[in-house]
Amino acid sequence: MTTCLSFVLDEAGVTRLAQLLALKVRVGDVVALHGDLGAGKTTFARALIRALMGDGDHEVPSPTFTLSQLYRADRIAVVHFDMYRLGGADEAHEIGLDAAMDEGLTIIEWPERVAELLPAQRFDIRFDEADDIAKRRVRLEASGPCGERLARLGAIAAFLDALPPWNTARIVYLQGDASTRAYARLFAEGRSAILMDAPRQPDGPPVRDGKPYSQIAHLAEDMRSFSAISAALRKAGVAAPEVFAEDLETGLLLIEDMGDRVFGREIFRGASQAELWEAAVDVLVHLRTIPVPARLPLRDGTTYSLPRRDFGAFEIEIDLLLDWYWPAVKGAAPSPEIRAEFAELWRPVLDRLLALPGGWFLRDYHSPNLLWLPERTGLQRVGVIDFQDALNEHAAFDLVSLLQDARVDVAPELEDRLFERYCRKAKAADAGFDRDSFAAAYADFGAQRNTRLIGLWARLLKRDRKPNYLQHMPRTWGYLDRNLRSKGLADLRAWYETHFPPKDRRADLDA
């Protein structure tokens, strides 16, 4: 697709447009800036580089005399070229244009001097005079994947344009996670908000029974779930972010900024893990007393219902271990006999999980999605985010996510103490609470969850080229070992010990 956008902007508007583009650029992109002397090319380039560096005052000299200038941002390397003094395209090779276009983001002023060297898929941005001498007419054009991202930029610009004062906000990129969602922090009039950019994702290829993985696993397809669940959690007394504005059809939300004191970062800074995790446990005890409504209302008059998993949803998650981790470690896919044995051993466990009563299951209730808000009191000290995939499932499931945190070590002693804290408070709130059956459900789900994660880490490496998640592999195996000590999982424990002895519980998987 080819996308064209046009704006008439003052200098502040040019800067905001550059900040928006900074949200969408990737390694290998070329931004070609066209226009006469003084048209605004360098203003735009400087703003784009500062946005990528995360520093609005970063020194960005014009490369008119040096011809190129390198910047190493956390996300991406950036090379800013000025081709005005170039004698011809051949000289561009000598100043490193080829390498720059391969290794990072390339910003080029006077790109017409090297037109034959530019890739067909790029961002072309042209600056012309406008009727108002204080403004510039800015036209952006791109095709292919760049065009798709430019179209998304246009949708974001239109969304924010209708939301003063956020239409004049400073825009700062926020690092996301393994999902397709993107985030930015907006600053305006002494306050901030978070832009959530979550377009509806096309279904992936069918993986089983003609259905894609996301559909089988009951993952949210759009942000209707986030909006509905956020309102319900807030009504229940949980510190979920308020949704200020939304375009659910487009997949854009403006939500409350609850800061960036995520649990994992707080631990790194020296906070007491026990204090934070105890507070998070208390939120889960509270949630078990809140019934899940059959329908959660949305602002547009429609409703959303939390789904429940079926056998296929649990099964496709544990099969990630066979589909991705097994071949990565053993060099070949498992045999049909191995798959059959694996499925037979898991069947009674999954049947037990399916028989459990429902409740709030936020699904990823762990350190990357929990914010510490010490300025608040009680349950409000724990900010909860990233719950759009929530389900109507057993209360033990979120406790496993927290006490066997995939990203942060939770020592066995701390896990035991927090588990007992939960059970003690649950019993006080509900005299019918049965600790033994709860513990069995906790172990069953812990085994299922950590089996899924072991396969997921391998898939993120092999399919998505994201090796950083392999650092969590030893921790995940450790948690799985804890769960497999449960009496009801003895047969599964024997299977794992047979097929994955210590030498095969590896994180050094080849890409």
Image: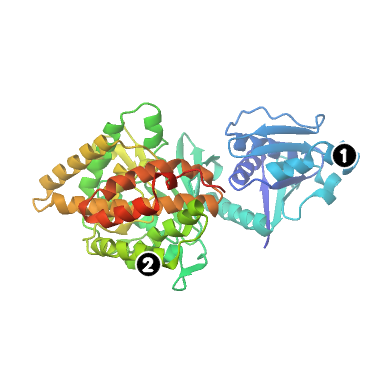
Q: Quadrant of residue 216?
A: bottom left
Which residue occupies the foreground of this view, 333 or 419? 333
Secondary structure beneath dot 1 equals: helix
The kind of residue on which mark 1 rests is Glu
Secondary structure beneath dot 2 equals: helix
Residue pushed farthest front?
498
Q: Earlier in the sequence, mark 1 or mark 2?
A: 1
Identify the residue under disc 1. 91
**What residue lies at 30% left-to-right and 52% top-to-bottom?**
493
Find residue 372 and report its horizontal and vertical position in percent: 34, 35
Question: Which image quarter holds the N terminus?
Answer: bottom right
**What residue lies at 62% left-to-right and 54% top-to-bottom?**
149
Numbered disc in front, either 1 or 2: 2
Find residue 196 and report its horizontal and vertical position in percent: 47, 49
- Residue 95 in the figure: left or right of residue 487: right
Identify the residue under disc 2. 340
The kind of residue on which mark 2 rests is Ala
Up the image or down, 474 lies above or below 374; here it is below
Q: Mark 2 Cα within 10 Å, few/some/many (few <14, many 20+)?
A: few
